[in-house]
Image (cartoon, rainbow, N blue to C red):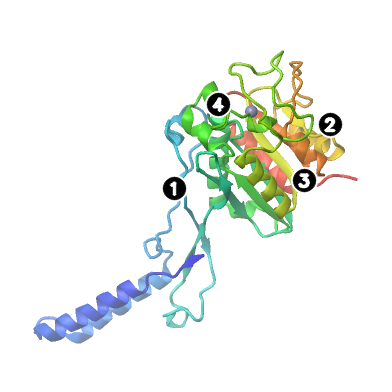
Amino acid sequence: MTDQPSITIPVSICIRMKRWHWDKKSQYTPRWLWLLICFAGFLLIGCSDSPTLVNVTKEPLQHADPRMASILPPKWKPTPQQDIQVDAEPDPKSAINFGGLLRVREREIVVPYVIGYSVNGRPLEVYRFGNGGRNLLIIAGIHGGYEWNTIALAYELIEHLKHDPQLIPPDVKLHILLSLNPDGAARAHNFLGRANANNVDLNRNWNVNWTSNLPQLRCWNLVRLSGGPYPISEPESKALMRYILDTDIEAIISYHSAGLGIFAGGLPTTEKSRQLAEAIADMSTYPYPPIDIGCNYTGTFIDWAARIGIASVDVELSNHFNTDFEQNLRILETFLSWTPTP
Ligand SMILES: [Zn+2]
């Protein structure tokens, strides 16, 4: 989706100036002077990269830690549309090109693709970059407001890619799900924001080693949550499953926090998932294998994804507050060029 440049504005100004000149029959400003001013204006626009012509904005990125407060206020909600500016060849069919004098810049708008809705009707938004045939997926916010920094990280990565879309290799299409659990993110930015609106842990709602009554011993148990009445019972889980199957995803990073390291998907762990986990561990301070707290993780998302043949890992950020942006930018670059070895 593109916007044509606002060439109509200077044209309109010139026409009005010319009419005004004729109406007033000014004796002080000869007609040729107005025409000269207009022509000079067009030359200036054509020879410059004037951002004002097409509203090109390149604001500095904001990253991590105490700055998170400014990125994600308590009632934060992502802007539904974000802009990206890319250079484009002048369109020969566009309204006025003046023989190439005008350097046309088009504004491409990255619109999040809504893959479904949460229990409370919030959209589940996927941002997509690149046009290659290898589909890679990053998921954030599966544990909602309890792990809100994963959503902040996804937001930062999306903003970074808008400014630097060349990061995406030609053979890759990257999908970033900004938040799988927007209801939890809206409820609270603490442990009360972990479940979806049905009190279901969306990371434990998948049909591998699934149970409704989540084990409490040595597992996360600050609040009693459910694995759902049955596997993939939740609208968020259904939407994600449908999208993954429809999109033919090859590899997934699901972001969590905090501190345990990198988990590879599969029961038992699949070879592809293990390779991806090791590749990410090589690029980061996150350990693989992860710290073992003795929890029996039931019905996890990455185990389900690994079972259907997708290289899948959970990556846990260092804490519940920072996005570890620089580190995760390196991980992104590794992910984008990663392929499993046979
Ligand atoms: Zn989590």
Q: Do residues under tags 2 and 1 come within 8 Å of each other at their CB atoms?
A: no
The dot on residue 59 is: 1
The mark lying in front, picked from 2 and 3, is 2
Q: Residue at x 79, y 44 (%)?
A: 310
Report, in whole angstroms, how far the alpha carbon at label 2 lies from the one at label 1: 45 Å
* Quarter where residue 331 is shown: top right
Residue 47 image-quadrant placement:
bottom left
The circle on residue 67 is none
The amino acid type, in three-letter code, at marker 1 is Glu
The spot of residue 77 in percent (x, y) is: 45, 40
Q: Circle 2 — which element?
A: loop
Badge 1: how crowded within 10 Å, few (<14), some, or many (20+)? few
- The CA span between labels 4 and 2 is 26 Å
For residue 334, side relative to residue 88 (left or right): right
Tag 4: amino acid: Tyr
Residue lying furthest right = 342
Question: Upstream in the sequence, badge 1 or badge 3?
Answer: 1
Q: Residue at x 68, y 46 (%)?
A: 137
Q: Which residue is pictured at 51% across the width and 74% down the height?
A: 90
Numbered circles on residues, count: 4
Q: Crowding at label 4, few (<14), some or many (≥20) Cα neighbours within 10 Å?
A: many
Label 1 element class: loop
Q: Can the viewer see residue 270?
A: yes
* 277 to the left or right of 121: right
Q: Amino acid at mark 3?
A: Trp
* Label 4 residue near ligand 1, CB within 8 Å: yes
Decide which of tag 2 and tag 1 comes sooner along the chain: 1
Q: What is the number of the mark on residue 267? A: 2
